[in-house]
Each structure stands twice: as C-alpha cells, then as structure tokens.
Image (spheres, rainbow, N blue to C red):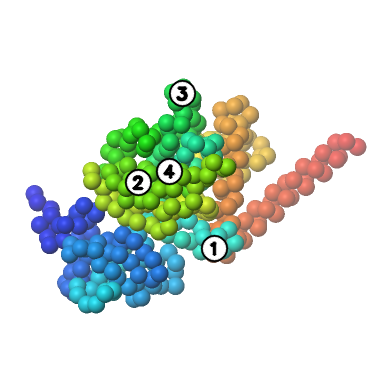
Amino acid sequence: MTSTFSTSPYSALSSYGWDDTWADAFAPYAAEGLLPGRVVRVDRGQCDVVTAAGVLRADTAFVTPNDPLRVVCTGDWVAVDPEGGNPRYVRTCLPRRTAFVRSTSSKRSEGQILAANVDHAVVAVSLAAELDLARIERFLALAWESGAQPLVVLTKADLVPDPVTLAYLVQDVETAAPGVPVLSVSAEQGEGLDVLAAVVSGGTAVLLGQSGAGKSTLANALLGDDVMDVQAIRDVDGKGRHTTTTRNLLALPGGGVLIDTPGLRGVGLFDAGSGVDQVFAEIAELAEECRFHDCAHESEPGCAVLDAVGSGVLPERRLESYRKLVRENQRIVAKTDARLRAEIRKEWKRRGAIGKAAMEAKRGGLR
C-alpha cells in the first residue's frame, strides 16, 4: 500500500520527517491553500522554513504567544503562506509530538524550548575532561521528560588510548544512565560513527552538551561535510567557545535529520519529575519497598533506599544527585503551582517536627 504523503506534492519533505501523521494533521491547512514546512532555524522573530518548494524566510508575528513554550522553535512543523513577499508569514504551528525544554533561570519559572519533534536526544560528553556524572544525569532527566529517546555519546575517545580505561569510563556513565545506550566515538578517527549514524537515521536527533563537547565536529562527521564551524578548546580548562550560536536543523545523508544546538552552560530542570524518576529508576524501584509510601529517604525508619546505600548496593553519590534534582524540580514547579507550594511547606513542617522530637528524645535519654 502506498502512503498518502509519498504521492503528495509535499513528498519532498519526507527527508525532513514528513509522514502520514503530519499529512493528516496538516489537512485542514492544506484546504486553506497553505504550505507545510519544517522550521530549520529561528532568529529575531523570523525563521527559515524548508518546504517542498525550497527554503523560505518567514515571519512569526502571527504565532508569537505570551507563553514562551509555544513560540516557534527549530523542529516545528508549520503552515506558511503559499506566496507573497520576503519574508512570508507563519500562520500556525502543528501540535508537537515531543519538546525538549529547560528552565531559563533558577530564579524564574519560565521554560525555554530548545527543540521540537525530536526522536533522539544525543547528549555529547567530552572525554578530554573529567566526567561530570551529575551533569549527565541532569541532561538525561530533561531528555526523558521531552519524550525523546536519550543517547549518551562520549566524544574524543581517541584521547583515551587505553581500551581498559575507556571501558571503565563507559561503565561509569552506564551506571548513571540506566536504560540509555552509551557510545564512545572519535570524530577525528571515525570510530563509532557508523553505529551513531545508524541510530539517528531513523528520525530527528538533537545534539546537546556543553561548549567544548565536540558537538560541531560530531555534526560535521555525521553530515559528511564541514557544515558547522569548529573552534579549538582552551588548553587552560578544556572548554570551548560557543561555535554554534543558533539551533540548526540539517538533513543527514544516511537518512534522518540533526538539530545542532549551542553549548549549554546552564541546564535547569523544568517540570521534569517523571524524567528524574526515569534517570534514577533503581531508586524508584527501591522506594516501593520503603515502610512509608511518602518516604523522603532522609532518616525514616524502614527506608529501603537508605538500606541499599548502607549495604553498598546503591552508590551514595546517586542518592545525593537524586535528592538535588528532586528539590530543584519541586522549586521550579512550585513557582507556578500554589497547591504544590502548600504541600511542600506542610512537608517541611512535618520533617521539622520529626527532627525536633528526635532531638528531645535524645536529650531525655542523656538525663
């Protein structure tokens, strides 16, 4: 059976992810004579949109809501004017399948959408610097929350020539990323790129990571051309400058599309509770055995999580990282949820009362 989109005038968009589901969603706008397209770049209220007729420049003035999470973003599928001046106008955005969102600031409750309609969230981590497992866990929490499948790519593997040491580094990351594939690659030597290319060929992948993680070099290797500018990292601290300054969507030669992003200094959580639970799946599983269903895994009796730490089954670092991300996520959500703020205050009072009672009991035993 031939798919409807492959025989439509928009079949040229299939290399950018157009399929029957998008065709069905766009049908009402097709009836109005609008053109479908995918946003490949956004800057200063305008965007580049790839359509069956080529790449168009479009203005987003008619689709700029007050909600920052609904603004046009790289990866969005949109409906644009079929003809007109330069730029044309985006008339609507199709509902997103997935969205990668982070908090813009720890002092505000606003979210920032980094990429839309993503299938794979590729977290690039450089082996030129010491692994920061807590930061990897933070990226993965956002990735799981987005609805995309996370993947950790350890770049610059050629800088770790000892295979035993490299295997240990991969194992450390796998421990911090349960259920997530971990690949070691060297863009310079071409190692591991075939596996990565095969993974991302089946949809849309967003490339995430800090400056100096080797994202642009990795993107060029996957694209088979020097599309993205590359700058050397600083010898002082191993960090790089922001080579990529905008989010760009590019078609891969082997199929699929890639969204390259600027280096992220801050990776704040934004309503990522389920993502945190998925990153720390073993803690969530242990918590089911706790005596109290609302156990905070702090000092409660019968806490299976604390017992696992005490026996060495669960690394204490994992529990500390989990606690930190849970607290941060609660603060962000509480800024926009009055009911949750009240529940958190109530929980703080409960813990305070437990602590006070414990201290009084301790003093009584010393008399």
Q: Mark 3 or 1 closer to N-term?
A: 1
Q: Is residue 98 left or right of residue 332?
A: left
How crowded is the residue under tag 4: few (<14 C-alpha within 10 Å), some, or many (20+)? Answer: many
Q: Is residue 146 visible?
A: yes
Q: Earlier in the sequence, mark 2 or mark 3?
A: 3
Which residue sits at x=46%, y=45%?
Answer: 232
Q: Is residue 180 above or below residue 240?
A: above
On the image, numbered disc 1 is attached to which residue?
109
- The type of residue carrying mark 2 is Ala
Which class describes the residues within 10 Å of circle 2: few (<14), some (14-19), or many (20+)?
many
Above or below 63: residue 114 = above
Question: Where residue 84 sits: x, y (%)?
Answer: 22, 77
Q: In the rendering, which numbered label is found on residue 96?
A: none
Name the residue rendered at 36%, 75% in the picture.
61
The span from disc 3 to disc 4 (Cα, nearest Å) is: 20 Å
Q: Earlier in the sequence, mark 3 or mark 4?
A: 3
How far apart are labels 2 and 3 at the CA level? 25 Å
Q: Say whether residue 204 is visible.
A: no
Label pair 1/4, CB-CB below 8 angstroms: no
Mark number displayed over residue 219: 2
Question: Residue 140 vs residue 294: left or right?
Answer: left
Residue hosting label 4: 214
Q: Point out the residue furthest to the right here.
A: 367
Looking at the image, which is closer to me, 184 or 204? Answer: 184
Q: Give me the residue at 41% from left, 72% from top.
A: 65
Circles 3 and 1, Cβ within 8 Å, touching? The answer is no
Under tag 4, what secondary structure?
Answer: loop
Residue 18 vs 202, above or below: the answer is below
Q: Which mark is residue 162?
A: 3
